[in-house]
């Protein structure tokens, strides 16, 4: 049987076949290919006319399975031949996952075994699904007071006859057990005591004012009668001033405080990708990481295209790490991106290139072409060597990386201040 495609064939106006790797006995061909848009290597699986339905069924099962290393990028049909575009994968894995007739059943058995061992960790709620939460405590309408009394009184009487103890009665629940007159009398006595105290304070203040006025008057009269004493006042004042100045000079002046060492300006020296859950996730895109720090907004780093903001369920999150030349404190992060809206990211700082032990200093979302995020400077303590941007949800792209997958990242520049 002649092979359906030859090297040089372009599928979907994007994927160029560079060579054939494997031809199975069932008439399925596996090719090496090149993504002409993203410049990455891909694998292409082509099936004969009788194997097309089986290939597509296995592809759906693999795409829905969270426990697979094969990422389905595109599928289509050319000249009555069904083909499938996947991430660059070894032929043995593609044959086992997509070509064999029982590949879908094996994937389902693997998912069931994983759920049995680890719990239902692979399940994802639909994008539009929701759960209606009912109130735990039903709201009770307040009953009229008369109705409450009519119901509570018989219940209290029954309880009294059964337990031989005084029962609670709604009719007496609001009755007072004190005499209002007692409090009124005590209140009047307090007022009288308070009034007497105020009068005593006023009289004492008046007496003090009179005494003060008499003292001032007597001093003025003495100054008029004895002018020579007045002449001596400047001398005494000068002597007192001299003594105060001498005492002040004897007090040691405080030592000048040391000025805080000025921190170096943050300068980016390198950029890398972090994906703790799957270290090889988007590793084939590392060749363009430098586009985010080359100072040219016309060059971009692009992620994979995804069908949902949670990265298609492949990972919970991943991060881009910026290494600085020297440890310092970073006050803000600036992201220049293309056509993304929504999504979310969290900013961490660390002395090592890892999210383990990192300090959260800010967060944001994609609201414009340029996003400036203020960072917590006090939390860094001048020890920031790496600024790590963890992408928690992918934004919706007005210019999607692939037409069928409208979520992803197009980052032109990253800078720090």
Image (spheres, grey):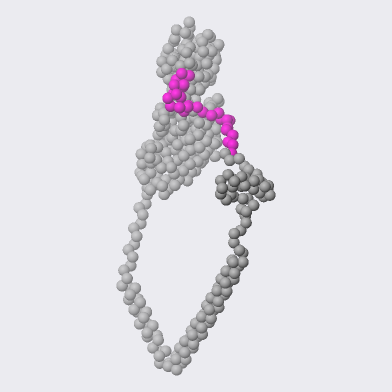
Coordinates of residue 288 in the picture (x, y in percent): 43, 31
Q: Quadrant of residue 245?
A: bottom left
Coordinates of residue 121 in the picture (x, y in percent): 46, 28
Any part of residue 8 in sight: no
For the point 59% across and 46% down, the residue is 161
For the point 35% across and 53% down, the residue is 261
Prevailing secondary structure class for the magenta stretch in the rendered image: loop
In the image, 131 versus 97, the foreground residue is 131
Drawn side of residue 283 relative to residue 206, left or right: left
Drawn side of residue 271 relative to residue 161, left or right: left
User: Which residues fall within the magenta stretch?
Assistant: 108-135
Q: Is residue 291 above or below residue 20?
A: below
Determine if the magenta segment contains residue 356. no
Coordinates of residue 48 in the picture (x, y in percent): 51, 9
Q: Looking at this view, name the residue that lies furthest to the bottom.
A: 225
Q: Is residue 22 above or below residue 144?
A: above
In the image, 414 versus 298, the foreground residue is 414
For the point 43% across and 15% down, the residue is 96
In the image, 24 versus 34, the foreground residue is 24
For the point 48% across and 41% down, the residue is 363
Coordinates of residue 208 in the picture (x, y in percent): 49, 82
């Amino acid at each position: 049987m002649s092979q359906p495609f030859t090297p040089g064939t372009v599928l979907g106006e994007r994927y160029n076949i560079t060579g054939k790797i494997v031809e199975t006995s069932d008439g399925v061909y596996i090719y090496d290919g090149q993504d002409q848009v993203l410049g990455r290597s891909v694998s292409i699986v082509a099936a004969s006319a009788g194997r097309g339905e089986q290939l597509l069924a296995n592809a759906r099962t693999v795409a829905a399975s969270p426990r697979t290393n094969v990422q389905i990028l595109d599928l289509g049909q050319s000249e009555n031949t069904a083909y499938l575009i996947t991430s660059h994968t070894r032929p043995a894995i593609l044959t086992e996952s997509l070509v064999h007739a029982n590949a879908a059943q094996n994937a389902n058995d693997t998912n069931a075994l994983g759920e049995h061992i680890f719990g239902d960790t692979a399940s994802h709620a639909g994008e539009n699904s929701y759960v209606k939460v009912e109130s735990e405590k039903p709201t009770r309408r307040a009953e009229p007071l008369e109705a409450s009394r009519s119901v509570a009184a018989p219940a209290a009487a029954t309880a009294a006859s059964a337990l031989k103890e005084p029962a609670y009665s709604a009719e007496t629940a609001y009755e007072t057990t004190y005499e209002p007159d007692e409090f009124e009398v005590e209140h009047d006595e307090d007022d009288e005591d308070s009034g007497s105290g105020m009068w005593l304070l006023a009289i004492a203040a008046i007496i003090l004012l009179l005494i003060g006025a008499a003292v001032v008057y007597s001093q003025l009269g003495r100054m008029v009668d004895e002018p020579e004493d007045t002449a001596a006042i400047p001398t005494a004042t000068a002597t007192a001033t001299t003594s105060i100045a001498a005492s002040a000079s004897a007090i040691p002046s405080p030592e000048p405080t040391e000025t805080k060492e000025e921190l170096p300006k943050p300068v980016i020296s390198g950029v890398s990708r972090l994906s703790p859950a799957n270290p090889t996730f988007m590793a084939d895109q590392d060749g363009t990481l430098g586009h985010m720090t080359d100072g040219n907004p016309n060059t971009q780093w692009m992620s994979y295209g995804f069908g949902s903001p949670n990265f298609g369920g492949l990972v919970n999150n991943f991060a881009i790490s910026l290494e600085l030349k020297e440890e310092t404190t970073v006050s803000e992060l600036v992201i220049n991106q293309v056509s993304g809206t929504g999504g979310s990211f969290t900013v961490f700082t660390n002395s090592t290139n890892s999210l383990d032990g990192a300090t959260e200093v800010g967060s944001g979302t994609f609201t414009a072409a340029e996003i400036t995020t203020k960072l917590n400077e006090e939390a860094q303590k001048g020890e920031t060597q790496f600024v790590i941007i963890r992408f928690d949800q992918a934004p919706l792209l007005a210019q999607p990386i692939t037409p069928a997958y409208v979520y992803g990242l197009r980052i032109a520049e990253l800078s720090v201040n």
